[in-house]
Image: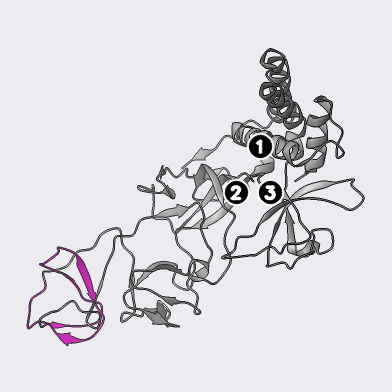
Amino acid sequence: MRTIDYSEILRGSAGLAGMKWPDDIGTAELSLFRTFHDRRLQAAWEIEAWPEICLIEKRYFRPMWSANPIYPVTTERFDILSGQYFQSLQEDFDQPPTVGGVVNGPYWAACQPSYSGPLFKAGTIYRVGDIVQNPSDGEYYQCILNHTGGTPPFGSTTFGKLTPFVRRIDEEQVEDGSDLGNGVAHTVIGEYLRAWDKDPRVTTKVCPLPYTLDDTGAIFVKPQKAVTFVWLKFRTRRPQLVGDAWRSDVGYPFVAGVGTQVYYMNQDQSVANFYVNNMTMPANSSPEDDPPHWDVVEIPYIFGAYLKEAGYADWLVSDGQAQKAQVHEQMALNFLDLEADKLWRQQKQAPRLIMVR
């Protein structure tokens, strides 16, 4: 993706306001324009399905099983060897869902949207894998130890509770055990756009998959066929512009995968950007001196002209010049319209026809 330095955007907005960058940009001016540009970046980011910020990825409904974490009861994982989803029936360490193609019944159960089984009866011989319904709560449980049913029958050493499997893809989905402190996360989803059973980049013979949204992601309630994964088109989550100016006298922590965003201008004062540290950094460690440990906040080049003009329009409003701001507001929108025109008319990026099977 082609990007633009934030200093180019700030220089443009400040220049329209009669300010020189960087000489006239102090803490107050930076805070003001940063707020304007952050708000306008959201508007530009979400108004179109821009190719620069939209991805198509193969996504599973749960992370892959990994041998490293200890999985709490009811944790759900995808077993790549069997191509099935399983849920943990008891806390385990290094116990795979399947062994030699056979379900590891004492520790895992195959996930299902619903379960069925007879009511539990005391005195009955139960073997690993048997499913019964608890008459006390109406829930279903799977036997994890060969035994003769007694009272109480649903302790952690005899039965594991079964929970209905929901096909869902969360906004902050993980690939393996990263939700338990291990592994690598997927690209964070901003908005869900489309879903298919095959990769639409290599074939038009795909089946669109409907979904509904809740507070954490997309739920595939009624897929037209049993699917273990989907090809998902989504808009990436837009970056926020919130960092204060970098200081040489402080260190920047990195906690639970999250760093601190800073605004940093290089030593020759030619370029400035927002950066986020990807590990704990000591005092006096700058993005310029230690670039591998600072990630630049990328702003798509296509938004540059809009952000410059829109930032100035917002500055005019804050300065009480609302009427003059309307002219520059329209100019800013014209820049977005131009980018949309290049996408849809000039580059012919109308949605492809899909052959539904």
Q: Which portion, as a residue range, is magenta? A: 120-149
Whole-percent x, y for residue 293 in the image: 74, 64
The residue lying toward the viewer, choosing from 215 and 25, is 25
Q: Residues within 10 Å of mark 3 (few under 14, many from 20)?
A: some
Please tell me whether residue 181 is drawn above or below residue 288 in the rendered image: below
Disc 2 is placed on an element classified as strand
Q: How crowded is mark 2: few (under 14 residues within 10 Å), some or many (20 or more)?
A: some
Pointer 3 or 2: first along the chain: 2
Hey, which residue is sitting farthest bottom in the picture? 147
Please tell me whether residue 277 is drawn above or below residue 93 in the rendered image: above
Q: How crowded is mark 1: few (under 14 residues within 10 Å), some or many (20 or more)?
A: some
Label ID, residue 243? 3
The residue lying toward the viewer, choosing from 40 and 132, is 40
Label ID, residue 35? 1
Q: Is 149 left or right of 20, judged from the image as shown?
A: left
Residue tagged by mark 2?
56
Gap in Å between the C-alphas at discs 2 and 1?
31 Å
Gap in Å between the C-alphas at discs 3 and 2?
30 Å
Whole-percent x, y for residue 117 in the image: 17, 67
Whole-percent x, y for residue 274 in the image: 74, 49
